[in-house]
Image: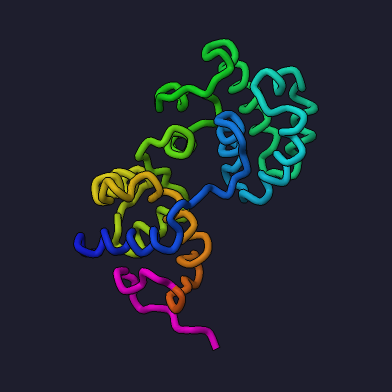
Amino acid sequence: MKRDFIPPFFATLQAANPEPKTELAYTSPFELLAAVLLSAQATDLSVNKATRVLYPVANTPQKILKLGLPELEGYLKTIGLFRSKAKNLMETCRILVEQHGGEVPRTREELEALPGVGRKTANVVLNVVFGEPTMAVDTHIFRIGNRTGLAPGKTPLDVELKLLKRIPAEFMLHAHNWLILHGRYVCVARTPKCWECAVAKYCDYKPKTPLPK
């Protein structure tokens, strides 16, 4: 993708959705942290289904610790890899209580030190909760970065660093959610919906998929 195309690419996404939001349901920094931790290799829908029942009962590190691991697993059993995720979430809650006063830390280093929290999860929290211009590269953003030519790279980190360098500052706050939503609903993996893509004219992908008959 030509550098001249990048500002209108994001301006178009912005015009269609000025304030994009994550599809994970949350009402506090901890609820978002937990939801993103649980969303690895799982859909937002499945995570929301579980947290819709869990959060009214336990939505703080202290309450989840009091709940105990076996009961936490019961709430998370509809999510893939729920046993390992429950263990990580429980240990994360312990660290939050013992080292951070029950609050979600604001630095990447502290976030990535939490069990089950990698760079992608840390970036989501830093961006969505604390308003930092970070870029969490999931499968959708990795695909878009390479397919469109916006930020080609062999690894998620390659794509992340190129996106941070190439996206104009005025679009960085919401760029993460714009790209995720675009990849989830338009620039999908198997058959990208080029016929309904508002930014197709800026994209390097060839050939464009035709309107289905």
Q: Decide whether residue 211 is among the magenta residues.
A: yes
- In this rendering, position of residue 63 left or right of residue 108: right
Snapshot colouring: rainbow
Principal secondary structure, stretch drawn in magenta: loop
Q: Which image quadrant is residue 94 in?
A: top right
Residue under the point 79% across and 26% down: 70
Quadrant in which the C terminus appears: bottom right
Q: How many marks?
A: 0
For the N terminus, give its image quadrant: bottom left
Query: Measured from the top left, where is residue 108 in percent x and y?
Result: 40, 27
At x 70%, y 33%, the residue is: 83
**Would you place residue 167 above or below residue 13 in this image?**
above
Question: Which residue extends farthest bottom?
Answer: 213
Q: Toward the viewer: 178 or 205?
A: 178
- Which residue is rendered at x = 33% and y = 75% of the image? 206
Depicted 101 relative to depicted 201: above or below: above
Q: Position of residue 160 (x, y in %)?
A: 34, 45
Magenta stretch bounds: 197-213
| Residue at figure coordinates x 33%, y 46% from the top left | 172
Above/below status of 21 relative to 190:
above
Most foreground residue, 26 or 93: 26
At which x and y percent is residue 66? 75, 17
Q: Is residue 147 magenta?
A: no
Image location (x, y in percent) of residue 59: 68, 28
Report the side of 143 relative to 63 (left or right): left
Camera-side residue of 28 and 39:
28
